[in-house]
Amino acid sequence: MWQRQHDVDDFARMERMCRDMAVDSTFPLERAGLLEMAENYRAAGEQARWETGPTAGPKGEASRH
């Protein structure tokens, strides 16, 4: 579980970095790319967060008890 929480934290950190760099970007295409990357990190963080829930199974799938 700790590794997954570490992954969730890393995805959130990378999302913030991309958004911060997008704000400072002077090129529209670069800004759009950074915002797209930030959204990808956000989605990956959400997925990892769901996989760390109390019903997560050994591979992150919901247990079917």
Image (spheres, rainbow, N blue to C red):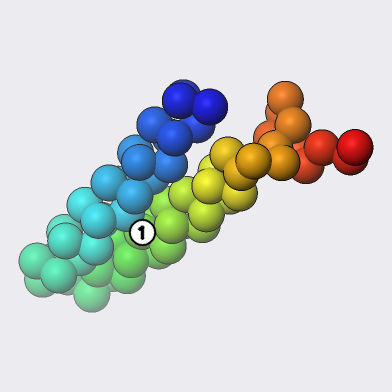
State the quadrant of the C terminus.
Answer: top right
In the drawing, does residue 22 fall left or right of residue 37? left
Percent coordinates x, y for residue 15 in the rendering: 32, 54
In the drawing, does residue 59 fall left or right of residue 37? right
Q: Can residue 44 be spotted in the picture? A: no
How many marks on residues? 1
Q: Quadrant of residue 64?
A: top right
- The residue to which callout 1 is attached is 38
Q: Residues within 10 Å of mark 1 (few under 14, many from 20)?
A: many
Q: Residue furthest right?
A: 65
Q: Can residue 2 be spotted in the picture? A: yes
Q: Residue furthest bottom?
A: 28
Percent coordinates x, y for residue 13 in the rendering: 27, 46
Q: Is residue 14 above or below residue 57?
A: below
Residue depicted at 14% across the width and 70% down the height = 23
In the drawing, does residue 13 fall left or right of residue 52? left
| Three-letter code for the amino acid on which mark 1 is drawn | Ala
